[in-house]
Image (cartoon, rainbow, N blue to C red):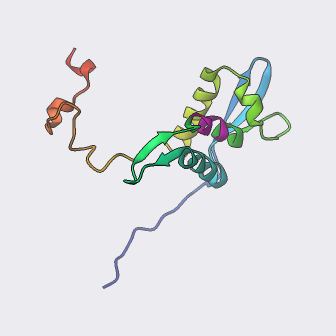
Amino acid sequence: MTKKFDDITFDDPTPATCDVTIGRTKYTLHEADGTASVEYRNAMLDATELGDDGKPRRLHGFASSDPVLVSRCLRDAQGQLVPVATILGWKAEVYQRLAEWIKEASGMNAEARPKNAEKSTGDGSSSPAASASPSEGA
């Protein structure tokens, strides 16, 4: 028997944009397209060194992934992509905030969790009540 899936419809596939001013320079920040998303994920994977057991052992250059993402999504007034070297010249708060906007607008914030993430609460218990954040109890 063939499974029936719901149809998928995108009314407007145009990436979202946001005007950004840094210093006195105006830019346009774009939601990640396929190329930007793939390059970002590749930068994260390239930075991950796996051990013999297949688990991440070391991260090297992982912090470069956000500036790479921003460079693929930020355009100057002439519509040209802003080079990574320019982005790295700004304070970290600037490109981190831009990267967060891109990830949120592009649906990239849903990060993979370990298989047992929903079972473990960090305190050794598997109780959902035990996993409440400390600020909720205060």
Q: Main secondary structure of the magenta part?
A: helix
Q: Can residue 110 be seen? A: no
- Identified at 62% across, 46% down, the residue is 32
Q: For residue 66: magenta? A: yes
Q: Where 7 sits versus 138, above or below?
A: below
Q: Can residue 135 be seen? A: yes
Quadrant location of residue 23?
A: top right
Q: Where 32 sits versus 70, above or below?
A: below
Q: Residue furthest right?
A: 78
Pick the quarter of the image with the N terminus. bottom left
Q: Is residue 118 left or right of residue 39?
A: left
Pick the quarter of the image with the C terminus. top left
Q: Position of residue 82 (x, y in %)?
A: 77, 36
- Identified at 41% across, 53% down, the residue is 52
Q: Residue furthest top?
A: 138
Q: Residue furthest bottom?
A: 1
Q: For residue 4: magenta? A: no
Q: Nearer the viewer, residue 15 or 64?
A: 64
- Identified at 73% across, 35% down, the residue is 84
- Identified at 51% across, 39% down, the residue is 59
Q: Position of residue 25 (x, y in %)?
A: 80, 23
Q: Nearer the viewer, residue 99 or 53?
A: 53
Q: Residue furthest front?
A: 52
Q: Nearer the viewer, residue 126 or 46?
A: 46
Q: Is residue 138 left or right of residue 76?
A: left
Number of marks in picture: 0
Q: Position of residue 16 (x, y in %)?
A: 63, 43
Q: Position of residue 107 (x, y in %)?
A: 50, 45
Q: Is residue 111 left or right of residue 32?
A: left
Q: Which residues are magenta?
A: 63-68
Q: Where 80 sits versus 136, above or below?
A: below
